[in-house]
Image (tube, helix red, strand yellow):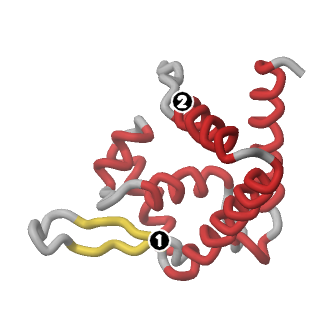
């Protein structure tokens, strides 16, 4: 398998696996793929706000606000007023949805254990470096 084929296969398998998991409501509480994208940003960005969310996702602030309101209504996201600036509200995942993210973390831990059992420390370190390069790739912006 060529490198390009391996990258495409990895992306395909990861996408399909995530969609399958989302369709099992026992695990993901029936969250849509679209909502999961928002939740991923909120979970990953420290002190996330609606403004930061709209900037990162390249959508209007009103569009981000509508989606955040929906996520709050479903009990997936909480707004917490900033202690420093009362006009600012930080977004965090609720404990209910944090459990779903813990499941993804456990899968990552399992993958790491499997890689460490199969490959040398140097190979795992190189792979980690490669993943960092892939993650930092300048994805085409339209």
Label 2 or label 1, whichever comes before in sequence order? 1
Number of other residues with Cα within 10 Å of mark 2, as a class: few under 14, some 14 to 19, many 20 or more: few
Q: Is residue 48 left or right of residue 99?
A: left
Q: Nearer the viewer, mark 2 or mark 1?
A: 2
Closer to the camera in the image, 21 or 11: 11
Q: Are marks 2 and 1 in contact (CB under 8 Å)?
A: no
Which residue corresponds to the image point at 78% horizontal and 72% vertical from the top-left? 25
Question: x, y percentage for residue 134?
Answer: 58, 30
Real-space Cα separation, disc 2 to disc 1, in angstroms? 28 Å
Q: Can the viewer see residue 19?
A: no
Compared to residue 19, the image places residue 1 above or below, namely above
Q: Tell me the residue at 73%/45% (across/down).
A: 120
**Residue at position x 49%, y 19% in the image:** 142
Q: On screen, 3 above or below 18? A: above
> Horizontal and vertical percent for residue 43?
47, 61
Residue tagged 1: 93
Could you say where residue 55 lies in the image, as x and y percent from the top left? 34, 40
Q: Secondary structure at mark 1?
A: strand
Q: Which mark is residue 133?
A: 2
Q: In this picture, is 80 found above or below 38?
A: below
Q: Nearer the viewer, residue 108 or 33?
A: 108
- Residue 107 picture quarter: bottom right
Quarter of the figure that contains the N terminus:
top right
Judge by depth and name the residue closer to the eye, 16 or 128. 128
Q: Quadrant of residue 60?
A: top left
Q: Secondary structure at mark 2?
A: helix
Asked whether the viewer can see residue 85, the reply is yes
Residue 29: which numbered mark, if any? none
């Amino acid at each position: 398998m060529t490198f390009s084929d391996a990258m495409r296969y990895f992306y395909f398998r990861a996408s399909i696996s995530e969609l399958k998991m989302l369709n099992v409501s026992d695990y993901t509480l029936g969250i849509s793929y679209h909502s999961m994208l928002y939740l991923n940003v909120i979970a990953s960005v420290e002190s996330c706000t609606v403004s930061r969310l709209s900037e990162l996702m390249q959508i209007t602030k009103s569009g981000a606000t509508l989606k955040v309101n929906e996520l709050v209504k479903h009990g997936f996201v909480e707004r917490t007023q900033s202690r420093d600036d009362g006009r600012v509200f930080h977004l965090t995942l609720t404990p209910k949805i944090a459990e779903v993210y813990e499941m993804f973390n456990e899968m990552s831990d399992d993958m790491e254990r499997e890689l460490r059992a199969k490959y040398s420390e140097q190979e795992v370190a190189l792979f980690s470096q490669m993943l960092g390069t892939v993650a930092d790739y300048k994805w085409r912006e339209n």
